[in-house]
Image: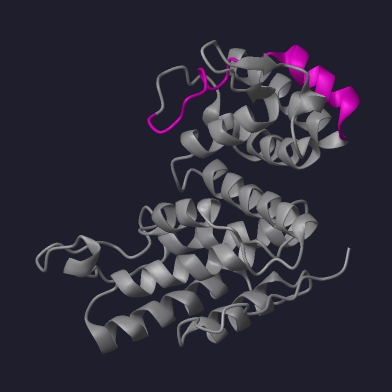
Amino acid sequence: MAPVQLRLEDEGAPAFAPRVVEILNSALALDSPTSPSQAATALNALCAEDYAEHGTAGSFLWWFWDLVHDLARQIPYDSPEQDRLAAIIQALPKLPTEAVNLGEDWGGASENRVQPWEGLPMFANTFREKLDDTDSRATEGTQKKERRVNLEAYASRIAGLGLIPSDMYAIWALADALEGSMTPIRGAPDEVNEDPTAVEDISYKVKSAAAWMIHAGHVLYGRDEEVLGATAGPLWRLDKKEAMKLRHKVRQEAADAYATMIKIEKDKSS
């Protein structure tokens, strides 16, 4: 697999964007002497610099995470660079930082101050927008699908580290891959085809669902309460027979996810 070299794709990116790309490219290289902690420190310095100039951090954090999500689309879902990026993000909340004001435009009253990386403010808002956008920078359909898998794999790693809530995104990915296809029937219940091979783009959707199981399954295990924003059933009550079908009909990713589900269940019950 060729080394990852991130690049700016948005001509309207914020002024700090080239420096973010430079820091990440330096740290993502597998032979890089830059540690995740050092890269996180450099990224935090950009935040502190912007805050000193503008007096609020909401705008910086919004566009920072918007940029990082975009860059994550460029990193293959199964590459070590994905793990390196997750490690850099994991290092951010561990940094000693000064509390900041997000700004009234970003839901922060002037007297309310927060740590810029604790809970990753603005991560979830911007990630939801990335899932919903059309990824216009993808040159053709196949690349668009691959970049979607990369984005979901990145989020699943961050969720697996306990840095963001993951339930809703995981359910969406799992439902897309495992609940079959649905045909609306006027005046009657919708017709459901449970055959996994009937699902459009099944190979890509299985990769996304598998990423959530492999990287965040240990966080998701045992969840059976309602998850706001999701319409699928309880999260872990997946039919493993369906996983076995996918194992034989789709790709190794499904088999890996199935093996991970079994391992987590054994670990949790022991």
Q: Residue at x 52, y 51 (%)?
A: 132
User: Can residue 238 be seen here?
Assistant: no
Identify the colour scheme used: one colour
* Among the 4 quarters of the image, the one containing residue 27: bottom right
Task: Give the quarter of the figure containing the C terminus.
Answer: top right
The image position of residue 212, as x and y in percent, is: 63, 37
Foreground pick, 156 / 198: 198
The image position of residue 243, as x and y in percent, is: 76, 21
User: Can residue 216 be seen here?
Assistant: yes
Foreground pick, 125 / 110: 125
Q: Residue at x 90, y 23 (%)?
A: 248
Toward the front, the furthest residue is 187
Q: Residue at x 42, y 81 (%)?
A: 45
Task: Give the quarter of the figure containing the N terminus.
Answer: bottom right
Q: Position of 118 compared to 75: left or right?
A: left
The image position of residue 194, as x and y in percent, is: 72, 16
Q: Is residue 151 magenta?
A: no
Region in magenta: 228-251
Q: Residue at x 50, y 79 (%)?
A: 42
Q: Is residue 245 magenta?
A: yes
How many numbered marks does the figure carry? 0
Q: Position of 217 compared to 5: left or right?
A: left
